[in-house]
Image (spheres, helix red, strand yellow):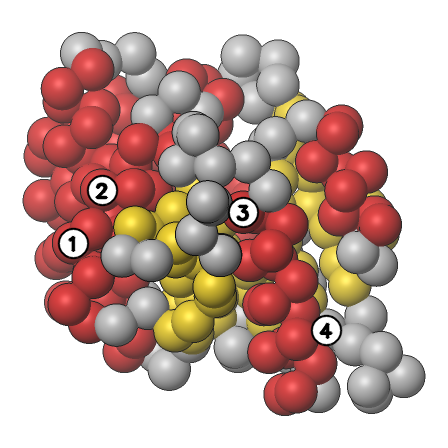
């Protein structure tokens, strides 16, 4: 019998486990592939440290972290900022710098350039930013469940939503079914496309 999938707030004790899951989910991602090619072990360590920093920063900024679990198994994680992206505190950059040392200078330069380019596409009006969503490879459908749960949280705050996806046209169509509309696009160095999407808050409209 398959254990039921539940979505709940990510507890502090699962922060490291969540960072490792996100690193696994994005280890073959098109965004990282466009930044730099480094050995698999360095990529895994750098991404784990990077997402560990993001999880801690999100808690500090009073965002919300959602976890999809089956029994005791963590199947997916989503990082959301309820006030969009705010300036990173100094200690946040210190945490990220550890991941940067592992990734190497070339990855850092390309990563900062990409981050700055995507920042220019971000909306200025108040919104919830769905910053990161990752799942286990053997758990399809978890992203859909997490996204719906995040939308419910955003609706309760009376805020629209913004996200970026590099998962391809199929994911864009799934998002559209959930009320999202395409906003802009950004072409990566490897030719892959990052789509930015917006969802109005039905409660506020």
Q: Position of residue 86 (x, y in %)?
A: 43, 71
- Separation of marks 4 and 2 at Cα, in angstroms: 29 Å
Looking at the image, the residue that sits furthest to the front is 1
Q: Are marks 2 and 3 in contact (CB under 8 Å)?
A: no
Q: Are marks 2 and 1 in contact (CB under 8 Å)?
A: yes
Q: Position of residue 26 (x, y in %)?
A: 39, 32
- Separation of marks 1 and 4 at Cα, in angstroms: 30 Å
- Nearer to us: label 2 or label 3: 3
Which is nearer the N-term, disc 3 or disc 4?
A: 3
Q: Position of residue 174 (x, y in %)?
A: 77, 42
Q: Which mark is residue 75?
A: none
* Residue 40 in the figure: left or right of residue 94: right
Q: Which mark is residue 160?
A: 4
Q: Which residue is mark 3?
A: 142
- Separation of marks 3 and 4 at Cα, in angstroms: 22 Å
Residue 184 visible in the current orientation: no
- Separation of marks 1 and 3 at Cα, in angstroms: 19 Å
- Nearer to us: label 1 or label 4: 1
Which is nearer the N-term, disc 1 or disc 4?
A: 1
Residue drawn where x is 60% and y is 56% of the image: 145
- Nearer to us: label 4 or label 2: 2
**Mark 2 falls on what kind of element?**
helix
Residue drawn where x is 27% and y is 78% of the image: 60
Q: Which residue is mark 1?
A: 16
Q: Position of residue 71 (x, y in %)?
A: 33, 58
Q: Nearer the viewer, residue 78 or 57?
A: 78
Q: Which mark is residue 20?
A: 2
Residue drawn where x is 57% and y is 22% of the image: 188
Q: Which quadrant is the C terminus positioned in? A: bottom right
- Separation of marks 2 and 3 at Cα, in angstroms: 17 Å
* Residue 70 in the figure: left or right of residue 198: left
**Mark 4 falls on what kind of element?**
loop
């Amino acid at each position: 019998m398959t254990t039921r999938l539940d979505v709940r707030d990510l507890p502090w004790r699962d922060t490291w486990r969540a960072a490792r899951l996100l690193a696994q989910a994005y280890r073959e991602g098109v965004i990282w592939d466009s930044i730099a090619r480094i050995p698999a072990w360095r990529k895994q360590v750098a991404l784990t440290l990077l997402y560990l920093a993001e999880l801690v920063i999100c808690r500090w900024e009073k965002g919300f972290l959602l976890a999809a679990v089956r029994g005791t198994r963590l199947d997916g994680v989503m990082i959301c900022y309820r006030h969009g992206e705010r300036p990173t505190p100094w200690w946040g950059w210190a945490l990220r710098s550890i991941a940067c040392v592992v990734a190497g200078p070339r990855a850092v330069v390309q990563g900062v350039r990409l981050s700055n380019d995507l920042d220019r596409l971000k909306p200025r009006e108040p919104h919830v930013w769905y910053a990161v969503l990752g799942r286990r490879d053997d758990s399809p459908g978890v992203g859909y469940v997490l996204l719906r749960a995040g939308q419910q949280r955003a609706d309760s705050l009376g805020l629209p939503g913004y996200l970026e996806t590099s998962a391809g046209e199929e994911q864009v169509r799934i998002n559209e079914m959930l009320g999202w509309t395409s906003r802009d696009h950004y072409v990566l160095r490897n030719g892959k496309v990052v789509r930015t999407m917006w969802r109005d808050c039905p409660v506020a409209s």
